[in-house]
Image (cartoon, rainbow, N blue to C red):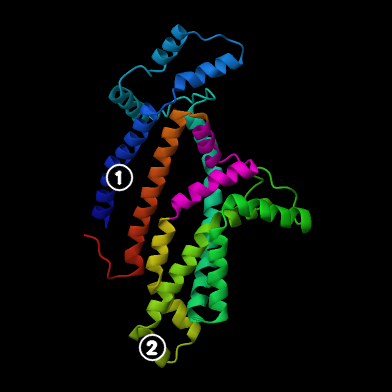
Amino acid sequence: MFRYAMARIAIMIPTLLCVLFLTFVLGYYGPLDPAKLIARQQMAMGLNVTEEEMARLRHDYGLDRPLLVQFGAYLDNLLHGDLGMSYATKVPVFYLISKSLPTSLLLAAGAGLILFVVGIPLGAVAALRHNTWLDYAIVGTSLFLNAVPIYVLGPLLMIILVLYLHLMPVPRGFQGPFAPSTFLFYFLLCLGPMATIIRQTRAGVLDVLTNDYVRTAHAKGLPPRAVVLRHVLKNAAIPVVTALGMMVSSFITGTVFLDTMFNIPGFGRVFSTALSGRDFTTIYACVVLIAIFTMLANLIVDLIYPLLDPRVVYK
């Protein structure tokens, strides 16, 4: 397994380079010039920016160099731990991300815990009550909530919880991991992936229930709960774990809307602000982190497979 993990990590490096290079090419050949963004900020302060000063700005920021030269310089700085300076805020990108990323990781961890604690049992119940009203209710409700975008569901829940039920004040900002508004954020972030977890668990449990060892366990007199916990769920967990590993991108997309709606100082807000402001240095750093998190999540999922099924062997 160690050799397999090292090989996967080695593959991540060229994959990360390809992702970063494609993003760099899109920024380089795009119609927007970062120098114009800087000049626009100076003009907003009452300064007059001439064409000569625009050329000087491009030279000072290295924007007048060829694509490969700029990309090589960025990689060199990246290897030395320098993510560059934000064009929009004139603040180091590393500072922006280091301040915002822990909040988003905490929200993603809370949403993932709810998926594990709520989604898997609901999927198992739906499978054990196959083709009954409970099965239809669980699957139908999860699909309905998945179909409603987070930027629609968020205001609806605020109207219900704040205006009608008066259960909380207007949620704004991050108040800590155990604040009532934070549990609302957990709930909103996990709603989209919840349907996938429920359906994967339901399909896996239904497939395992037809196996001979399950019938043998029932014939031996094991309680139904013990059969489900010891034999069914463990063998049905592989597709569920795979789905969990693929939900990293869903959490990132969810935090973009979540941070914008509720003014949360998270990674999604930094990313969305960089996109809307054409802050390319921040965009490149965010893309690198998203790619790293996605690849690491899939690697962890692959390494968990042998723990769930001894027949899976990596050489």
Q: Residue furthest left?
A: 315
Please name the amino acid that badge 1 sits on: Met
Please name the amino acid that badge 2 sits on: Arg
- The residue wearing badge 1 is 12
The part of the chain drawn in magenta is: 247-276
* Real-space CA distance between mark 1 and mark 2, rounded to the nearest whole angstrom: 43 Å
Q: Position of residue 198 (x, y in %)?
A: 49, 68
**Which residue is at 28% across, 50% downward?**
8
Element under disc 1: helix
Dominant secondary structure (helix, strand or loop) of the stretch shown in magenta: helix
Q: Position of residue 85 (x, y in %)?
A: 47, 24
Q: Position of residue 220 (x, y in %)?
A: 40, 92
Label 2 CA crowd tier, 10 Å (few <14, some 14–19, many 20+): few
Quarter of the picture containing the C terminus is bottom left
Q: Work out whether residue 100 or residue 230 is closer to the camera in this orientation and state it.
A: 100
**Which residue is at 33% across, 70% downward?**
309
- The residue wearing badge 2 is 215
Q: Work out whether residue 233 or residue 163 is closer to the camera in this orientation and state it.
A: 163
Label 1 CA crowd tier, 10 Å (few <14, some 14–19, many 20+): some
